Amino acid sequence: MWNRESPAKGEEGRESTMGQPPVSTALPDERRAVAWVGKSVIFIGSLISSEDMTIDGHVEGSIEVLDQALTIGPDADIRADIMARVVTIHGTVTGSIRAGAKVDVCATACINGDLVAPSIVIADGAIVCGRLDTVSGQSEVAKPQGKLAIA
């Protein structure tokens, strides 16, 4: 009874999966092409990604997606400095944004901070409170900015 060698009636062709982790049937090609931070996620700290990323949640700290694209969703609340190759903003950002190629500010965006990129596009209806700086090359974006001292 405890050590049966043949399957019981009705158990032919079935293997026991008790105690085994579930096996994913998704093919590698079906994986998400973009990393995603959902609406209910609250992230505090340094967020670093080496793949395209979409953020719909709340992030405080810094975001680095240096050689990739970053999309800030319409429901996002970002309180962080951002560095990416291309940044598309639909939501709210408080902090500086530095892009190696382009910053695209959509009509629903609200930004309180400086924008630095070779190309900056601001849609009609977007709110931007800060300094805009278009630089000639990506190497300029990577250089650290000096601090101003006011006496």
Image (tube, rainbow, N blue to C red):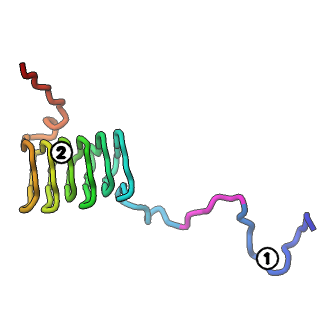
- Give the extent of the magenta segment: 19-25
Mark 1, other Cα within 10 Å: few <14 / some 14–19 / many ≥20: few
Total residue callouts: 2
Residue at the right extreme, as displayed: 1
Residue drawn where x is 26% and y is 49% of the image: 78
Residue 20 drawn in magenta:
yes
**First in sequence: mark 1 or mark 2?**
1
Residue 90 image point, x, y percent: 20, 59
The label on residue 99 is 2
Q: Quadrant of the C terminus?
A: top left
Question: Please, what is the three-letter code of the amino acid marked with disc 2?
Answer: Ala
Q: Main secondary structure of the magenta part?
A: loop
120 or 44, which is in the foreground?
Answer: 44
Residue drawn where x is 25% and y is 55% of the image: 72
Residue at the front extreme, as displayed: 151
Which SS class for mark 2?
Answer: strand
The residue pinned by badge 1 equals: 11
Question: Please, what is the three-letter code of the amino acid marked with disc 1?
Answer: Glu
Question: Marks 2 and 1: in contact by CB < 8 Å?
Answer: no
Residue 110 image point, x, y percent: 15, 54
